[in-house]
Amino acid sequence: MITKTILRVTLLTIVFFTNSVRANEYYVNASTGNDTNTGSKNLPWKTIQKAANSVVAGDTVFIMAGTYMLNQKIEPLNSGTADNYINYLAFPGDEQLAIIDGSNIPLPNWFGVFSISSKNFIKVSGLQIRNSSYAGIFIEDSTHIIVENNHTYQTYSSGISAWNCDTIIIDNNEIRRACWPTDGNQECISISGTNHIIVKNNHVYDGGSIGFGGGGEGIDIKDGCTNAMVHDNLVHDIASVGIYIDSYLNDQAKIKVFNNTIHHIKGTGITAASEEGGALENVIISNNTVYNCDDRGLVIHWTDKPDYLIKNIHVQHNTFFENGEGLDIGVHSLGESIHIVNNIFSQNQVYQMQNSSEDLNQAQLHIKNNLFNGDNPSWALFGDDFIEDDPKFEDVSSHDFHLPSSSPAVNNGVFLTETVNSGTGTTINLKNAGFFSDGYDIEQGDIIQFKGQTQAHEIIDIDYIQHTITLNETITWNIGDGVSLAYNDETPDIGAFEYDGTIVLPTDDIESLTIYPNPANDIVNVSEKYINDYYQIISLTGSIVRNQKIISPKINISGISTGVYLFRIMGEDSKNILITKLIIE
């Protein structure tokens, strides 16, 4: 496992620490530039394409504020390398003020205003791209591409798309009016036939085609994608589906959709399906909040074609509220191992959950411990050990679906799976490892917790065939120990949020804690006296995003999204808890 860990860290380092050696910096200014200039800050180029034709590995192009009315699409000529990305960046302070306008260029299909084709190790950041007759940012046959902090507006096809690629990061972009207007196609963010995908922290809204045969889904992971993490996105006011996982023609596996907020969708909030025969396997839909969608909150395989394999689908700890319908299971005869556990279905209009399939082997459905509140006709589906009660959300008028202490969802969740033997070590055999992810070698694995233990642990490897997980440290466990995502009290809660949205701490044991720098970027320092204690970094929604033993006073926080977190240190016995606020920039 040492080799596995080293490889994983290396990949994360390549992905997140670009441009370790910067060769040259060049500047583009639409107002004062000239393409016969040297490209220096004082003598900038006029067009971005001049820069794209000139830069090589390690170079950075700073694009100054202004409107760039294109007469041709932007297409990089060269690739970067693993240690030396080529960066196309808005000049610091000019983010989204560098406006790239495609109004004057008629793009054919399969191109974008900014097109990256058969190139590697490129970052595009801080730009505003608008008025495209096809896509905004279009990527094909490329590897190690980062698209972050951009805004796209009014594109006939996708705001951002990637086709047949590897290692693609789409982070913190705003996508508005994609697949626009009534006959636009593809999806607002389209990822197809791609391996190793991160789509996170994006705001996707006010988009989607309403014309027959058009596109319009918010985020689509489709047609043979593998190893995808789709999380912490906000998707709303979309004409079709909020987030769509569709294997289409080609087999698709290892997709995790989690911590997303999806609302006011004309169609369904989340759909997992196979439209044209590709097998869909090992999908996790976890800790999402879906509300006020006109159609259903979640659909699992909506097509009428019975011979498509839908296997190992795990729906856990989600909240569905006031959608037209709740969850619809449309899987046919080849459906296998469909698990729906610890979800809240509240005030969905027609039903909270149904099985619309007539030929699915019911033994393949594993529905347990969901909380229902609202209308349920006689044919509705409940599963085992269900709860019928009001979840008592904090404030539905402001769409705050956190739980108060009085909620029947608090401490009423079940453990997702359990161990099948006793032992000591790092590799553990479970009844069902499919509830969890190891991060697919692109992000951190799930933070899990065993029944009766206070310490949480990171999964660094999963074998879905043998149902084994490998942890980041040695532990001791007993046969039949419950295993779940990290939780706050004696047992997990039901729904998308653990009680109170933050970790509940014993205030008598809290001491002051100093960490520096704070705000931090890649490293945070703690006192050497905490070596061999544990630290956790916790989001303000209660999710534990990092949980490790302290082996050095310098703690690497790379790979964690920017934002405000709780930073907690505690001893192995969970006493002497220290906590402070951490800002990651």
Image (cartoon, helix red, strand yellow):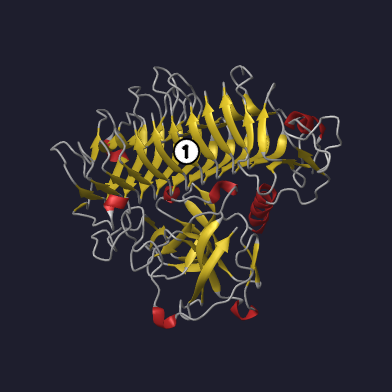
Query: Is residue 473 at least partly visible in the picture?
Result: no
Q: Quadrant of residue 448?
A: bottom left
Taking the image as shown, residue 133 lies to the left or right of residue 314, namely right
Rendered view: 496 above or below 64: below
Q: Is residue 100 above or below residue 2?
A: above
Residue 550 shows up from this direction: yes
Counting from the top left corner in percent of width and height, residue 461 is at: 55, 53
Local SS, label 1: strand
Please provide percent x and percent y for residue 211.
Answer: 40, 18
Question: Which is nearer the eye, 132 or 215?
Answer: 132
Q: Position of residue 252 (x, y in %)?
A: 50, 33
Quarter of the image for residue 479 reads bottom left
Query: Which corner quadrant holds the C terminus?
Result: bottom right
Q: Total marks drawn?
A: 1
The three-letter code of the residue at mark 1 reads Val
Q: Is 85 displayed left or right of 394 in the figure?
A: right
Query: Which residue is disc 1 drawn over?
Result: 204
Q: Residue at x 36, y 37 (%)?
A: 336
Depth check, front residue: 50 or 188: 50
Which residue, as the protein is rendered here, is positioned at the far left? Answer: 378
Outermost residue toward the front in this view: 32
For mark 1, does the 10 Å Cα neighbourhood hold few (<14), some (14 to 19), or many (20 or more) residues? many
Q: Residue at x 77, y 51 (%)?
A: 20
Q: Give the position of the N terminus as an image quadrant.
A: bottom right
Q: Position of residue 228 (x, y in %)?
A: 53, 41
